[in-house]
Image (tube, coloured by chain):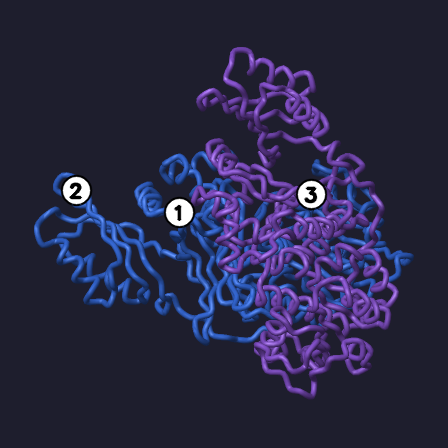
Chain colours: A purple, B blue
Amino acid sequence: MSSNDHFTVRIGVLGCGTVGSSFISILRKEAEQISNRTGISLEIIGVAVKNRKLARPVEIDSEILTSDAAALVADPMVDVIVETIGGLNPARQLVLDALRNGKPVITANKELVATYGKELFDAAAEGNVDLMFEAAVAGAVPLIRVLNESLIGERITRVMGIVNGTTNFILTKMTEDGANYSDVLAEAQALGFAEADPTADVDGHDAGAKAAIIAMMAFGVNAAVSDVYREGISNISADDIAAAKQMGHVIKLLAVVERDGEKIGIRVHPAMIPNTHPLASVRDSFNAVFVEGEAVDEVMLYGRGAGGKPTASAMLGDLIATARNLQQGSVSSVGRLSSLPISSIEEMISAYYLQLDVNDAPGVLALVAGIFGENGVSIRSMDQEGKESTAHLVFITHKAREADMQKTIKELRKLEEVRDIGALIRVVGD
Amino acid sequence: MSSNDHFTVRIGVLGCGTVGSSFISILRKEAEQISNRTGISLEIIGVAVKNRKLARPVEIDSEILTSDAAALVADPMVDVIVETIGGLNPARQLVLDALRNGKPVITANKELVATYGKELFDAAAEGNVDLMFEAAVAGAVPLIRVLNESLIGERITRVMGIVNGTTNFILTKMTEDGANYSDVLAEAQALGFAEADPTADVDGHDAGAKAAIIAMMAFGVNAAVSDVYREGISNISADDIAAAKQMGHVIKLLAVVERDGEKIGIRVHPAMIPNTHPLASVRDSFNAVFVEGEAVDEVMLYGRGAGGKPTASAMLGDLIATARNLQQGSVSSVGRLSSLPISSIEEMISAYYLQLDVNDAPGVLALVAGIFGENGVSIRSMDQEGKESTAHLVFITHKAREADMQKTIKELRKLEEVRDIGALIRVVGD
């Protein structure tokens, strides 16, 4: 590309909420710098919104404002579609229409990519155009580009990500202030860090969608949201956090995707990780993704997982890459997705943390320990603390099969000496 | 690109030392997976070495081994050159010849890119081919791709990097074991983490070359090694480390590139950063680069900065990107470099840490504090500790101009009450 070339790309933006309006305002602000640096002019020629009368954080010329998203997608004057509507419908049909008609799409829509990934990638291949979704996983953290370009030749063994800001904020507050889950959740809701209905975050749905996308990009497998094993953080107690701290660990909600022989495991669950692990120092609502590979060893990417401006920044990077491709007649490929089987949670090997309240009577500890042993789960450490007639036991196991650990818990539940069983937390990163 | 396409890229490798042999062995191991995923076959058809008879860590068919690097570069059968020789000569001429003859080049040669960046980029533009150098800065940390693609539209304000593994190893050991600089250096040399002549690392030359490259990629300026202000770590004492620890900080050797009004500051020096800063937890020989931008907020990239396999992994990512470009007839551009002026160290604004030994006599503290004040440097905190007839003073200043701070030190040196002045360390990241 000679530096005298000049190339204009005309953009249609779908939606103008937090992300859409941030995108428009950043693009306006940086257009000149981008043009100087890359020789490419980026011009927004249409913005589709539900209600044209609504007040917006950015001023938009009424001439380019439309309520007909489908017409904007079909407009032959539009070179690229930037989708910021979110949700499955009507986003799915609009994106498919754009791609099939040879129009590249930039999207931040994790739900869409995690649910219809294969269909969308096929439509992009059919239209021979780019589908870019850097902002769909961990916001401004440049994970998708790094997995699909820098690490495309790497034999990745495991990816572990803190990909949900709300739960990381809650767990950070619980760790640093010793507070209870429900109190911190209420605080997070008051501060606007958590939704009124926090289910999508705290039950791991949001992280699950991102785990499916990570599986596609890191391992080239055709994964979907339904392949993801999922546990949330609502049963993590202040006791668990304190026990982790005592062990020199922190509890994080992790999306884990790993090679398990000829299968791929995809799951979201709380995990204890050592303080010395790079993921342990990811605080508040920040996101980070830790990638392990045979040659690269360890790579971690860290940044803002959400928010209008960081999300828009990621979409702008995608847009410029797409524009460079349009200028040269080239396309960025996500590569071929194979159908490597997904392993079930029962097959997983992990160390575990488990706490129990039991009757403080002679022989109870031996009884409990015996059940671990009978099920093939070897105990690495045990801590006992008395509270009146109850003993509080904290176990850390050596690595064991999840199925064996689940069977252990099932049998422990049957014992009348066992009064309460706390959260089962995997211990990773040692 | 339809998934039925198949495309072969023939590679000439220059050099077969640690990096070259790792590259060859990883490429051989992963070629099939890469072909399945991308539809691209990567084939090494020539390896140029100084001495064909030497034993090597990888077996290389004698038919593809040559001692004539120039002939390999000129060979019309070779599609891409992978340069692993290092150093300025003959690497410079070989790379220029390849680029000018329309042959893309992958290199890990930081010295070459930092010294002749503009000339190389011009040659790549002239030949309309890729010049890729991800491995030249922070090894397997995917910084170059992220700066040149993900963040190309971002208004970056500052980049701070731990880009030299040897000095980070030394500073980590000093911090965690309370050891002296010279003892840890000797240990690092015994372990092979530091060279027999450690100057390039400990005096900041290596980090300086990387800072120049970061300036080019993050700010699009035509920077070179000679534009970098540079201080090493050899005058950092165990006392400095202990003082930092007491303040909740750690000392790191940082490459800092920042926007300073209409200028760009490029420098390498030890700095104190708070424990809560993401760079503080980068331990041992790991590298990390922390990028601040107006929209993206904060992004950090972390990984192995050196070593045969991580470096080869980064080069393999570059090679696949280049192969995809060759397949499509496209080129990745580094964009246009402007000649934004470089600011001098005297213009820098920073907070500072300084320790002094002074006579323990009435009025000395007032005298010393007065000199700070007269030069416009405001003191944030002062700690005094007596050792017999000497008082040990530790100052932290508010933000001040470097020129004013240097003038303060110059005047302090003139006082006969001042017995010794320790290292001046910038305090950043608060």
Camera-nearest label, 2 or 3 = 3
Q: Residues within 10 Å of mark 1 (few under 14, many from 20)?
A: many
Secondary structure beneath label 3: strand
Chain of the residue that carries numbered disc 2 in the rendered image: B
Amino acid bearing label 1: Val
Amino acid bearing label 3: Arg
Q: Nearer the viewer, residue B208 or A14?
A: A14
Q: CA distance from mark 3 to mark 1?
A: 38 Å
Q: Is residue B169 above or below residue B154?
A: above
Q: Is residue A133 above or below residue A279?
A: below
Q: Which residue is mark 2?
A: B386
Q: Nearer the viewer, residue B327 or A406?
A: A406
Q: Which residue is mark 1?
A: B250
Outermost residue, right side: B4
Q: Residue A230: which disc? A: 3
For the N terminus of chain A, give its image quadrant.
bottom right
Residue found 16% across the figure and 62% down from its top: B370
Q: Is residue B88 visible?
A: no
Secondary structure beneath label 1: strand
Residue found 64% across the figure and 22% down from its top: A412
The verdict on a common chain for dots 2 and 3 is no
Q: Quadrant of residue A255?
A: top right
Secondary structure beneath label 2: strand
Q: CA distance from mark 1 to mark 2?
A: 24 Å
Q: Residues within 10 Å of mark 2 (few under 14, many from 20)?
A: few
